[in-house]
Amino acid sequence: MQNIPVDHIRNFSIIAHIDHGKSTLADRILELTGTIAERDMQSQVLDNMEIERERGITIKSQTVAIRYQSRPDGPGQGDAYLFNLIDTPGHVDFSYEVSRALEACEGAILVVDAAQGVQAQTIANTYLADAAGLTIIPFLNKVDLPGADVARAKHEIEEGLAIPAADALEGSAKTGLGVPELLERIISEVPAPAGDPKAPLKALVFDSYFDAYRGVIALVRVVEGTLKSGDGVTFMAAGLRAQAEEIGLRVPAHQPCEQLEAGEVGYLICSIKDPKAVQVGDTVTQSAHPAEAPLAGYQAVKPMVYTGLFPVESDQYEPLRSALDKLTLNDPSLVYTPESSYALGFGFRVGFLGLLHMEVVKERLEREYQLDLIATAPSVEYRVYTTAGERLELHSPQDLPDPASIERIEEPCLKLKIITPPDYIGAIMELCQQHRASYENIVYLSPTSAEMHWRMPLAELILNFYDGLKSGSRGFATMDYELDGYQESKLVKLDILIGGKAVDALSLIVPAEQAQGKGGALASKLKAIIPRQLFDVPIQAAVGGRVLARQTVKARRKDVLAKCYGGDISRKRKLLEKQKAGKKRMKQIGNVELPQEAFLAVLQTD
Amino acid sequence: MPAKTASSVPPWQSYQALYIHVPFCKTRCRYCDFASEAMEAGGPAAQVHMDTYVDDLVLQLRRAAKAGELAQLSTVYIGGGTPSYLGGRRLTELLYTLSLTLDLARIEELTLEANPDSLTPALVRDSFALGVDRYSLGVQSFNDRELAALGRPHDATQARAAIRLIGERPARLSIDLMCGIPEQNMTSWQASLAEATAPELEVSHISVYPLELHPATPLGRAAAAGEVALPDEDMVADMLAYAADYLSRQGFRHYEIASYAKPGQESRHNSAYWTGRPYLGLGRGAWSMRQRGLAAEVGAGTGGRTLLRERWCDGKLQESVVGAEAVAREDAMLGLRMAQGISVAAQPEPIRQVMSQQIARGLVVEEDGRYRLSRRGLFMANEVFASLL
C-alpha cells in the first residue's frame, strides 16, 4: 500500500451517537474492501474488548489502513486508494481523545439512526468534527427498520447540525445497503491530505497502546514533514527523546515501512516502556530538525471522577495494585494513589475520565483479574481555600480539613446539553433543578426534538443524574457535557456514624442545604441494608458533629434452625457455612457487620 | 460392612438407632423442600412404586440383620415423607419384617411418623400390635386457614380425631406445631398451643419450630412475590418465647431447641442424634453415621473419635469422614441444642475459647461445669453454631 500516492489517501472517522451503528458500519467497510475476510469477522472487529462488545461501545480506538479498489465508472476511476479508518472512542468520557483522533482526519462519516434521529452525542461529535475542519458525510442508518423516519432524521440533521442532508446516503450498516456508494463518496468528498513532506516533522499522536514486548505503540498522523524509520525523534509535550525503531501501517496487522509522509497515518514504536510517557495529543518531531512549535490542542489528561477501590479481602491489595498497573499500560488516563480507610482497609483512590470509564475499569478489574471490589461514592476534585490562604485540591471527603479552617470551597462545573422530545421538558427541568443546575436556553431542532442547555456542578452528574434523565424521559433524552470551570458552593462533609463510629468510606461532600435531606435518606437506606445483629445498631448522619438524622437497626431476636435430626446434620451444616461465608464478606466496623451494599447506598441516594 | 481394621485402630461402634425413610406423601405441602414424592396423582404406577420400595426396605433390613448391624439398636424411627401414607398393608409388611429382624424387647422406642389424614383406626391397631409405641403426628396447627395456607392435606378436625385415635392405646404421642405461618397471629398461635396441651388429648411431646421459607417452594415464591403475608421475624420470636413460657407452665420441659416433653417423654431416638450415637439409615437418601474411638462421654466433645457419614443416593455411595477436631465441634453444636448442654471439662481449648466469646455475647451460660445456651441463645442459636464451624 506504500506505493499509493498521497493524493489517493483518505483519512476519515466514523462518528455517531451510541448504538447508531458506528462499529457495524466499520465492520461492513472492512468486509466489503476485503481487509478482513468474512470468516475472520468476529462481529465488530473494532470493538475487541469483551466489555466493549457487550456494551456496544468502543473505549480504545483501533485504526486500520484499508486498500480500496475504486469503481472504474466512479470518481476514483478504478484506481487503488488507501483509506485510513480512524476509530474514535464512543463515549462522552473520552471527548478529548475523540477530538485528537478527529484531528488526524480530513473527513467524517456521520452515522445517524433513521429511527432515533439526531441525539446528544451526534451533535457533540459533529461539533468536534466541525472544530477539526472535517468534511462530514451523513449516512442514515437502519433505514430498513420499521421505525425508520428518514424525512424526520434528515430534517434534524439540517436543523440541528446545519449539514445539508437532501442527498444524504440511506442504508443499513447491518446488511451493507448503501455502503458501496459510501466508499465512492469518501473518494469524491473527503479531501486528500495536504502537508509538505519536506517541512520539519510534526506528527500527531492520536492514540497509543502498550505491547508487552515492544513497549508503547503510538498511532500517529504525519501532519508535516516525513517520519523515517531509524530517526531520532522527540515527543514535544513530554520532552521525551527516542529513536523511531519501527514505523508502519496497521492493515490491521503491523506492516513495517521505511517512512510516513505528510498526510499518512501509521504506527510508531520507540521502545518506550513507560505508558504514561506518551500522551494522546502530543507532537512527534525529528530531533535533528525539530519543528518550531508543536501542533495545537494538546491537553494533559486530567481525571474528572475519583473513587476509592478497596479489595473485599485484605490479601487482595497487592493483586489489585498489579491489576491496576497492567490496566494502566493500555489506559494511561487511569491514575491511582494508595488510600487507606478505617472501614475498608488498604485500597486505592482512582481517577477516571468519567463515569463510564469508572464502571468499565471496575468491571475489568473484577472480571479479568477476578477481584472482589468495594467502590466508594465517586467524588470530583474540589478546590478548598483555607483561612491560612492555601489552596488545596482534593478529591476524597476524608481529606477535607476542619470546617473552621475552610474559607471557601469551589467545585467543577459542566456545560450540559440535553436533547429530548418536548414532552419530557417539564420532567427534565425538575430533575435539573434538583441537581442544582442553572438553566441557560432551549432550542427546538424539530417539532419532536428540543435541545436544552444547562450549567451544572459535575458532582451532581455523578450521583444518579443519568439514571434520572433516562427514567424521567422514558429513555428518550440523551445528553452530552463538557467541563466549564469551577464555581464556589457552600459544601459540607456529611459523615455517617454506625454504632457510634464514623465510617470514613461512607462520608460525602454535599451542598449544605442538602445535608439534612441526603443524611436522612442515607440513614434510611442503610437501615434497610444493614442486617439485624445481636444488638441495636444506631445509624447517624452528621455534619461537623451535629446529628441530622438517626435510624436504628433493632437487635435480631430469632436466628435458629428449627429441627435438626440425623439426616439433616450435613444439610444444616451447609446452611450455617453459607451464613458464615456471608458474614465473612461483610466489613466489620467495631462490633457491627456491614454488608458491601452499604457502601453502594451512597451512590443510590438522591 | 465395616472394613477390617488393624488392631491399633478401635473398631466401629455398633449402631444404636435405626432410621427408616419413607419418601412418599399424598401431596406436596406448599412449604416443603424435602425430596419426597407426591403420590396422589400417580395412579396405579404409584402403588407399584411404593410396593417395590417397601419390598426393597424389607430386603435391606434382612441384610442388615444378617450382618449383625441391628443387634445393639435401642430405638427405631420410621419417618418421611409420610410413612402412614404407605397404608396398612405395606406398613404391616415393614413392621413385621422389623419384628423378625431385631429383638423388639430390647427396643426402647419405636416411632411411626403419621399425618392426620392417613391415620386410620386399622392402621393404628395393626401398627401398635406390631410394636410401634410412639407416634409422631404432623399436626402443625389447629387452625384450618393456616393449614390450608400451608397446603397441608388435612384439617384440624382430622388432627383431633387422629390424636384421639392414638389416645385409645397406651402409646406415646408427639405432635408438631409450626409458627410463623401465613394467616397466623399471636391469638391463633396461643389457641393451637392450648389445644395441643388440653389434658384429655394426652399429648406428651411437642415439637415447636418456625416455618422455614425456601425460595424454590410454592410458598417461598409466593412470599417473594409479596402474595402472602407472613408474621414478621419479631412476631415469630414472640411466638417462640410464648411457647417456651406457656409449655413450661403446662409441665413440659424444653429439653432441646425445638422439643418439649413431659418428664420422661423425651424422644430417645432424636437424642441419639444430638449426643453423637451411631445410627443406621435405610431407605432412599437416608444418612448413616458410624464412628470409632474412645469416648469417656460420648457426644461431649471428648477427643479421639472419628466419624463417618454415608448414604446411598441414586445408586452412588456418598461418604464424608469427619476428623477428630471437627467431631468435637459438631458434638458441641449438637450437644448445645439440648438443655443439658455440654461438659466444660470435655471440651478442647479452642471450643472453650469460642464458648467464652459466646458467654460474653450473652448467648451461652456456664453452670455446674456445663455450657448451655442462654434463653436468648436458644432463639439465636445459629450465631453460636456458626461460631463453632
Image: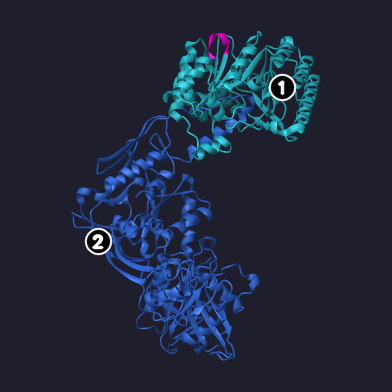
Chain colours: A blue, B cyan
In the rendered image, which quarter is residue A526 located in?
Answer: top left
Vertical order, A498 against B376 (above or below): below
Vertical order, A459 against B53 (above or below): below
Crowd class of label 1 (few under 14; some 14 to 19; many from 20; radius 10 Å):
some
**Residue at point 43%, 87% (across, down):** A195
**Highlighted magenta segment, given as a residue range:** B196-204
Left or right, B64 with respect to A391, comes to right
Which quadrant of the figure contains the C terminus of chain B?
Answer: top right
User: What's the residue type where badge 2 is placed?
Assistant: Gln
User: What's the residue type where badge 1 is placed?
Assistant: Trp
Left or right, A43 with respect to B13, comes to left
Left or right, B141 with respect to A480, comes to right
The residue beneath circle 2 is A487
In this rendered view, identify the residue nearer to me: B253 or A323: B253
Q: Is residue A276 visible from the viewing direction of this image?
A: yes
Tag 1 and tag 2 share a subunit: no
Vertical order, A591 against A214 (above or below): above
Q: Disc 1 is attached to a residue of which chain?
A: B
Which quadrant of the figure contains the N terminus of chain B?
Answer: top right
Secondary element type, mark 1: loop
Asked if the residue under mark 2 is in contact with the one under mark 1, i.e. CB atoms within 8 Å, the reply is: no
x and y percentages locating residue A503 in the rendered image: 35, 42
**Residue at point 42%, 33% (across, down):** A532
| Residue A313 lies in the magenta-colored region | no
